Image (spheres, rainbow, N blue to C red):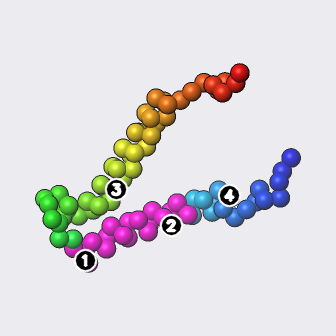
Amino acid sequence: MSRPDDDHWLSRPTTVRKLWWAFAVLLALTVLVQIVFPVDGHFGADGWFGFAAVFGFGACVIMVFFAKALGMLLKRPDDYYDD
């Protein structure tokens, strides 16, 4: 049984593909802006080109792995609250 909102413009594969490309271009442009406006780092590595993007991506990956490990540690059986 199909719902009337199955053909929403955000759920179409072509739109999703276009959005991924648009976001990738936008993210690349935000890194390339560093060519015009160079960053003066306070420490050694934070002045490198694209450091903030790499640092942010790495922090995100670490948070995902930490959340997965925490979920495995705190996971309870499906019938945990049953009598």
Is residue 21 in the magenta section?
yes
Q: Does the magenta stretch mainly form a helix, a strand or a loop?
A: helix
| Disc ID at residue 22 | 2
Give the CA distance from mark 4 to mark 1: 37 Å
Q: Does dot 3 land on a helix, a strand or a loop?
A: helix
Q: Nearer the viewer, residue 82 or 28?
A: 82
Q: Which residues are magenta?
A: 19-38
> Which of label 3 and label 4 is nearer to you?
3
What residue is shown with label 3?
A: 56
Mark closest to the chain's N terminus, 1 or 3: 1
> Residue at image x 29%, y 61%?
52
Q: Which quarter of the figure has residue 55?
A: bottom left
| Disc ID at residue 37 | 1
Label 3 close to label 4 by CB (< 8 Å)? no
Q: Position of residue 77 (x, y in %)?
A: 60, 24
> Residue at image x 17%, y 57%?
45
Q: Residues within 10 Å of mark 4 (few under 14, many from 20)?
A: few
Determine the residue located farthest toward the bottom in the rendered image: 36
Mark closest to the chain's N terminus, 2 or 1: 2
Q: Position of residue 17 (x, y in %)?
A: 57, 59
Determine the residue located farthest toward the top in the rendered image: 83
In the rendered structure, which amino acid carries the disc numbered 4? Answer: Ser
Is residue 12 in the magenta section?
no
Q: Nearer the viewer, residue 60 or 48?
A: 60
> Which of label 2 and label 1 is nearer to you?
1
| Disc ID at residue 11 | 4
Image height check: is 52 above or below 78? below
